Image (spheres, rainbow, N blue to C red):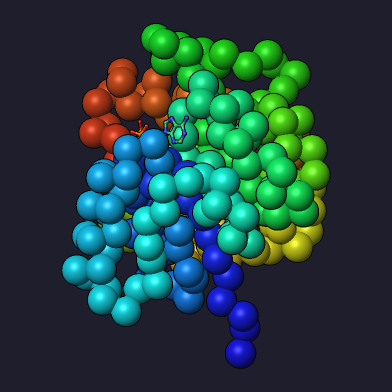
Amino acid sequence: MKTMQTIAIIGASGNMGAAISKSLSKGNYRLLLCAQGQDKVQAVVEEIKSGHPAADVKSIDCSLEASWEADIIVVAVPFAAEKEVAQKIQEVANQKIVISISNPLNDTYNGLVTAPDTSAAEELQKLLPNAKIVKAFNTTFAADFATPVIDGKQADAFIAGNDEDALQIASELVSTAGFNPIVAGDLSVSRTLENMQLLLIQLNMKYNYNWLAGWKILHQ
Ligand SMILES: NC(=O)c1ccc[n+]([C@@H]2O[C@H](COP(=O)([O-])OP(=O)(O)OC[C@H]3O[C@@H](n4cnc5c(N)ncnc54)[C@H](OP(=O)(O)O)[C@@H]3O)[C@@H](O)[C@H]2O)c1
């Protein structure tokens, strides 16, 4: 039997962190949830436990400790907070898979704050040079996790990274969360993925899709 992996979710009380935590609690994972305000994290743990009493999930008030215990670290904080988080976990993130979910949007949602020749994921890789950064979950809205289905088909979720094993493990996470994982390319493809979500956000605002829009590649 496969060894149970431990996943630290930093920012677990937020829209995305809570959605990822809830969806992964259905898989064979041990989840360690943390954020800055521990009360809100504990509320997420209790919600998960009320639906899945057997779920292996607990709140932990220190992102360093959670990341030290983890095999995989999901950084589910705003882009602006990633530097602070990376500094905290740097000493324990070596060789671990670190999932970058962020979209580095500017204040008016009409552009990204990152330069065109980089991405939030690549910036996180610079901050954590010995970690295996994988971009995932940035093209899915938090609201999509409850029913990751578009027109009766499983919604796609794109993944990018440089390490084959890490991409495989991230694909399993995405699949456990209910999405169809598509490996889009190496970490530099995160630039495209982050721009894709910027476009979707802009279309959402323009056409009022109610934040349930997602991506589905149609092929026959
Ligand atoms: N919302 C979406 O649909 C969506 C979709 C795709 C990707 N994303 C990306 O997902 C990330 C989170 O977005 P969100 O909408 O979930 O944001 P959110 O609801 O504001 O949640 C942010 C989370 O990060 C935590 N946090 C903030 N600063 C922190 C720090 N310095 N150390 C530890 N935890 C910290 C917050 O906890 P405290 O309240 O305790 O500070 C909270 O749990 C962003 O990078 C965003 O671009 C969001």
**Which residue: 41% across, 47% down?**
61
Where is residue 209? Give x, y as percent: 27, 32
Split into quadrants, the picture shows ligand 1 in the one at top left
Q: Residue 158, relative to residue 7: is it above or below?
A: above
Q: In the rendering, at what x and y percent does residue 10 appear?
A: 47, 44
Q: Say how many tags the image has.
A: 0
Residue drawn at (39%, 36%), measured in percent from left and top?
Answer: 36
In this rendered view, identify the residue nearer to me: 187 or 27.
Answer: 27
Is 98 on the left or on the right of 23, as rendered?
Answer: right
Determine the image quadrant of residue 35: top left
Residue 74 place in picture, x, y as percent: 54, 48
Can residue 36 be seen by looking at this rendering? Answer: yes
Q: Quadrant of the N terminus?
A: bottom right
Q: Quadrant of the C terminus?
A: bottom right
Above or below residue 164? Residue 187 is above
Q: Which residue sits furthest bottom?
A: 1
Residue 153 shows up from this direction: no
Quarter assignment of residue 123: top right
- What residue appears at the point 60 percent right and 26 percent down from the top-left corner? 83
Q: Pick the residue in front: 69 or 100.
A: 69
Looking at the image, which residue is at 49% across and 71% down? 29
**Considering depth in this image, is 196 or 5 the residue closer to the camera?**
5
Residue 107 vertical position relative to residue 176 in the rendered view, above or below:
above
For this view, does 45 lie left or right of residue 160?
A: left
Q: Position of residue 165 (x, y in %)?
A: 75, 63
